[in-house]
Amino acid sequence: MDVLIYLIPASLFLGGIGLAAFFWALKNNQFDDPEGDRHRILSSDWDDEPKP
Amino acid sequence: MGKTVPPSASACPACIAAPSAERIAAAAAQRGAASAREGTIMLSLPTVHCAACISAVERRLMRHPGVRDARVNLSLKRVSVEAGAEVGPQDLIKALEGIGYEAHELDAEALAATAADRESRDLLMRLAVAGFAMMNVMLLSVAVWSGAADATRDLFHWISALITLPVIAFSAQPFFRNAWKALRVRRLNMDVPISLAIVLAAGLSLYETMQSGRHAYFDAALSLTFFLLAGRYLDFRTRAVARSAAQELSALEVHRATRIEEGEERSVSVGELRPGDLIVVRPGGRMPADGIVERGESELDRSLLTGETMPVFAGPGMAVSAGEINLTGPLTLRVTAAGEESSLNRLADLVAMAESAKNSYTSLADRAARAYAPGVHLLSALAFIGWYAMTADLRLALNIAVAVLIITCPCALGLAVPAVVTAASGRLFRRGMLIKSATALERLAEVDTVVFDKTGTLTQGAPEPLALDRHPRERLSLARALAEASSHPLARSLAGAIREMGIEAVEVNDLEEVPGHGVRGRWQGREIRLGRADWLGAQAGEGTATWLKVGDEAPAAFEFKDHLRKGAEEAVRALEAQGMEVILLSGDSETAVRRFAAMLGIGKYHAGVRPEEKAEIVIGLAADGRRVLMVGDGLNDTAALAAAHVSISPATALDAARVASDIVMMGADISPLGETVDTARRARARIRENFAISLLYNLIAVPIALAGYATPLAAALAMSASSITVSLNALRLRR
């Protein structure tokens, strides 16, 4: 069972990365327009180059 | 990436704590100073709906000189444009109209990030943290439940404690805060048993862990926090969506006026107007303040204030009130009262008073909590005393008391109402109904009488000519020629109707609009005139009419009738089918109202009603024990809207009327009214079912807990199962 010493911190760390990513997304207005983002993926604008 | 929210607004933690009244006052004060703020222009785009729309709008706006960035928000049907100071919203609106999109200017300041936005983000953050911790602790708990013993179990309990305690301190803060607020004024609310259960579960588990006990309820404490936060967030989200749409409506009325300063016209914010100022109101514009006409002649549409459809003549020396619409000629006004003193705002005060009376309505959830909280605490205390008396084992008695508290904790109860309200509001939102008040659905479900205002609610408020085929062709083509020269609503409606009949206009020379009277011109050497009866020397009849006079011939009348609003018949029929009594109120004459009521099949009506009487009728009905739904749009309805048990107004209604009502109809079609009441009734039934479900779970789980057989696993199962059943039951409403 010694492996738990590594596994528990590892699982907490991985979950923590997910949580941090969610915070980042929330802070960067990623959830402001879910309806629009759903449609935006279908448009071909900025397919070849990123929006300046 | 475009930001829909100006970054400056989020850097004010003190605003969250500030009372809303102060915030509104501050925002209003700021609006005047900062309305010319360069940078972000917000436009409302009611017709965007697809991926092609997004890129068409954005591409067109980016092509406009001076525009740095444009981003469409499809969820809110808005576009925010970053542009230099030289770009005005009018240019952008014209550009968008060119590619076929309707656009309206929005007040960017009014839409700036509000405290509500931050609060919802804050709740979501706490919810995420609680969810993260819950999943990790649950993993560790599964190991314990499946038989980890001794040192391993203790280690897992300690790790769980390490995760749980800080997370609860962070995530459960909203509950602690509300509970403390209630306790300070010696009252009980739902948050008191919630906070107590969370704190006791965590505290007892920590103690048990120290004593290397078998049972720890860390996962229960966390899942309680998580599920209840989810309910709280849903609740908040629903109301925030309605609020932001309502905010948008009020932002549509751009708060600007044209003031004459040293002979020059300047556009200023309405908030800056002072009594004594000279302002210009162009045809089609709304009076921004009360005043007296100094120069100019015109006609006024007072229907929003008085409910009367007939335009009124206005000339120098006449007093006008804020909210009236100037129809034909430009008017110069001397302001007598502006802003808070204007007649518009005095009515708003009345509304505020009526609103506070309405807020005393106790929702189903509150009533449940009031019965529930003391019961739970009593039960838990009895369990503690009983077990201690029987076994004299303090630790065991405490364990059982806490288990009772956790299992009865209103987890499902916390989700029962918000889940249903979210599902019902979402369904109604798609039908164009905006639920503004949290308890509106519950109140709507109790309604047994519906009172309609006629003008602007059951009718479109736009008149249409009657029986045009009675007139000879020549008269119609003359009328069309004259009517097309005017922007008066009667003239425009007449011209449009004749055009549809395929009758061409004759050539008329020297066309001239006489503001406040009508239009005149010359045809075959004779003067022809179209306009008000008294201008042409005719005797005005009972209905709305405009008159045509050719040379010295006797004037001929074109009569008008206000058209039924789309869906009015269906709405009335649907409401009556649900067993409701429908009553019609109008300021119009007896004959007109009788004919109208008969057409819709409404049995009961009151004609010639003055604004104050409308509220009296509603209050009278309420005194008879009726639950009244008031549907109205005008300023004259405002007091009645506020006095009714629940109220609905169309989006075309005046600001004050929309503020006073609980639900706003966004579409022009009012047929969803019947469905709205039906949905409200079904929502109430679902809420009751949900209460019954959580009660059922408690009936099963409480005896087990009281008998001392409850384990953390049983608590987790009961909690998750009841929460999920309740949410699923609520989801049935979406169909």
Image (cartoon, grey):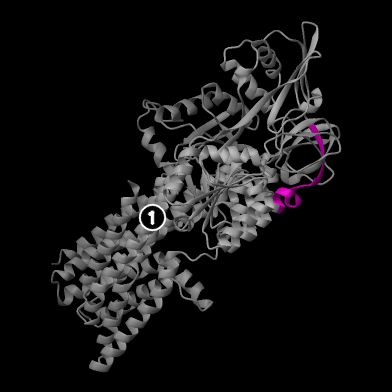
> Residues in magenta?
B331-346
Element at label 1: helix
**Residue B341 within the magenta-colored segment of the rendering:** yes
Residue nearer the viewer, B294 or B623? B623
Q: Position of residue B277 (x, y in %)?
A: 83, 42
Q: Where is residue B228 in the image (x, y as percent from the top left)?
A: 37, 63
Residue holding disc 1: B683
The correct choice, above or below, for B65 with respect to B346 in the image is above
Residue at horizontal 21 percent and vertical 82 percent from the top: B707
The correct choice, above or below, for B225 with respect to A26 in the image is below
Q: Dot 1 falls on which chain?
A: B
Residue B124 visible in the shown view? no
The correct choice, above or below, for B429 with respect to B714 in the image is above
**Total label count?**
1
Residue B678 visible in the shown view? yes
Q: In this view, does A8 lie to the left or right of B585?
A: left
Q: In this view, does B388 lie to the left or right of B493?
A: left
Residue nearer the viewer, A22 or B722? B722
The correct choice, above or below, for A46 with respect to B359 in the image is above
Which amino acid, by three-letter code, is at mark 1? Answer: Ala
Q: Where is residue B341 in the image (x, y as percent from the top left)?
A: 76, 52
Q: In this view, does A7 lie to the left or right of A33?
A: left
**Residue B93 within the magenta-colored segment of the rendering:** no
Q: In which quarter of the image is residue B122?
A: bottom left
Q: Quadrant of residue B308?
A: top right
Q: Position of residue A43 (x, y in %)?
A: 38, 28
Mark 1: few/some/many CA within 10 Å (<14, 14-19, 20+): many
Q: In which quarter of the image is residue B185?
A: bottom right
Residue at horizontal 29 percent and vertical 78 percent from the top: B404
Residue nearer the viewer, B731 or B637? B637
